[in-house]
Amino acid sequence: DSGVTQTPKHLITATGQRVTLRCSPRSGDLSVYWYQQSLDQGLQFLIQYYNGEERAKGNILERFSAQQFPDLHSELNLSSLELGDSALYFCASSVVPLGGGTTDTQYFGPGTRLTVL
Amino acid sequence: AQSVTQLGSHVSVSEGALVLLRCNYSSSVPPYLFWYVQYPNQGLQLLLKYTTGATLVKGINGFEAEFKKSETSFHLTKPSAHMSDAAEYFCAVVLYNQGGKLIFGQGTELSVKP
């Protein structure tokens, strides 16, 4: 158990709908990352927050958005869902952002499997 | 731009045999390198990481990896495979100047035959 929790574990929805995925980082971790894992794209970084502020953005669609709340949990919002959005969405956390001389580790949650029908 | 290439999307070994999973990276600055393992229907678990210092890194479950700058490689090895090692393995590099996001390779699925 990494200490990172994600809910829900599974989500089945229809095209055009909107869903929210939730992540609670490990106790004490200030940085949260979201990744998407799909068969065709592999593991792709979406977005990162550090202590409530957006820190880095990856290949995140405009239909997707995220935020980190004062209690440090994070939510990933996916709207106008398409079939191609079906994937496993992971959240990871670290004490501080990696890089810049730090060598911290990202710990991953169990993921949310999203199926768009 | 930094990138990671894992050679071989599927590797099959017999129980007790050597495991070798290959990873090559491209980076304009000294990289931090990671190996993660993903068991079926689970999240990613850190096996080991290289930051600075000793180039031979030991991880969990008997795995180790050697950072070779001249070959831009970070191959993962285990002397003797167990059935429980069957999983998908991901090599990753961190981007320093972009908040520390991980760039992953495409993954290598390891099968272990009895």
Image (cartoon, rainbow, N blue to C red):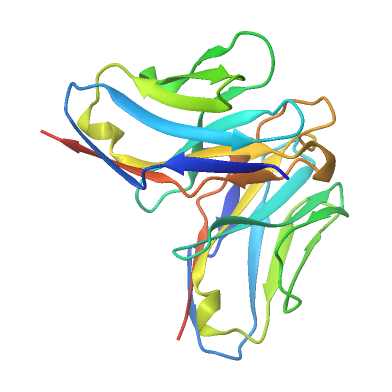
Residue A81, by quadrant, is bottom right
Q: Is residue B77 left or right of residue A34?
A: left
Measuring from the top left, give residue B58's x and y in whole percent. Answer: 48, 15
Residue at image x 70%, y 50%? A33
Q: Quarter-wise, where is residue B31 in the image?
A: top right
Q: Is residue A23 above or below residue A27?
A: below
Q: Residue at x 38, y 32 (%)?
A: B21
- As rendered, which of A97 and B68 lies closer to the eye? B68
Q: Position of residue A65 (x, y in %)?
A: 76, 70
Q: Residue at x 61, y 88 (%)?
A: A17
Q: Nearer the viewer, residue A55 or A11?
A: A55
Indicate the position of residue B4 as horizontal and vertical percent values. 57, 41
Q: B109 or A107, which lies in front?
A: B109
Outermost residue on the front side: it is B70
Write down the quadrant of residue A54 in the picture: bottom right
Task: Tell me where residue A10 appears, x and y as whole percent.
Answer: 46, 68
Q: Looking at the image, which residue sits at the far left?
A: B114
In the image, farthest residue toward the bottom? A16
Quadrant occupied by the C terminus of chain A: bottom left
Left or right: where does residue B5 sit relative to residue A70? left
The total of numbered circles placed on residues is 0
Of all residues shown, which one is farthest toward the right?
A53
B63 vs A87: above or below: above
Above or below: residue A28 compared with residue A45: above
| Vertical placement of residue B47 versus A16, above or below | above
